[in-house]
Image (tube, rainbow, N blue to C red):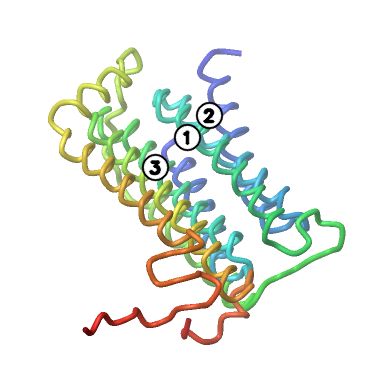
Amino acid sequence: MSRGALVDVAFWLFGGGSVVAAWLVFRTDSMVRAAYWLLASFAGVGVVMVLLNARFLGLVLVLMMAGEMTIMAVFMVMFMMNPAGLNPMTMVHQHRQAKIAGVVAFAGLALVGVVAEFPDRPADPDGEPTAELGRELLGDSMLLFETAGVTLLATMIGSIAIASKRGRYGDAEDGSAPPPLALS
Amino acid sequence: MRLPALLVISAALFGLGVYGALSQQTFVMIMMGLELMLNGAMLAAVTFWAMTAGGAPKGQLLTVIVMTVMAVEAALGFALVIGIYRIRKADMTEKLKRLRG
């Protein structure tokens, strides 16, 4: 078997596997398992990215999602009912409309992907995409990169402010209360 | 013929994400649907970068931006889940029928 055929098999294995894992996210009874099926789906996409020569992005995706899904699994155990999946569970609403919307989204996007004519300009297989990305991030697109960093900082501050138990306006469990007016 | 196949795979991931985000009742499962949509978008972006854009570095940058969006979505989603649980003891959308806090 040639190397190209092997890569093709790997594409189908990991690409198809990520779709199957994504389907199982909404099929399993256990929410913790759902989190790990989602991780499997991301890992499949990460491997496909590595096969497409975007090695850095694929590995970053897998690392990032491993952390995030662990947090998600802990969240499930903390907050959700029936996290272990001991009882069968379907917690869905507007199921029919949701199915239709999902199928329509898939069919529309897949149709565009199959029918549309895209330019055939493959990336240089011997290129150095990671080094190029690094030069781009610290060169022409530095402002974009910095903006992403500041956005993440703002998100950190904002999410701590939302989630903290005691804020400026009193205890979180009291619900929202009007701020005290300092009229003196 | 890898380009159409990969685009169909990313469309399938996006469609499953749409289904999940619209049908699930638990907040965290809704977030999983949103992340699946972003997953499909990211796969499509990397596919286009590798096969139609000649490996232009700005294509990879787009994926980095999508990853940032993913991190922001996850962090704010978890924070909102904690906030709502504190005030209403709610873990499902059906428990939030009023907007008043």
- The disc at residue A47 is 2
Q: Which mark is residue B67?
A: 3
- For the residues labelled 1 and 3, say whether their Cβ atoms are less than 8 Å apart: yes
- The residue at the point 40 percent across, 23 percent down is A53
Q: How far apart are labels 1 and 3 at the CA level?
A: 8 Å
- The answer to whether B18 is drawn above or below residue A154 in the figure is below
Left or right for A21, reference B63: right
What residue type is disc 3 on? Answer: Met
- In which chain is the residue bearing label 2? A
Q: Mark 2 or mark 1: which is in front?
A: 1
Secondary structure found at label 2: helix
Q: Which mark is residue A168?
A: none
Residue type, mark 1 in image: Leu
Label 1 sits on residue: A61
Secondary structure under the numbered disc 3 in the rendered image:
helix
Q: Is residue A126 left or right of residue A25?
A: left
Residue plotted at (51% across, 87% down): B98
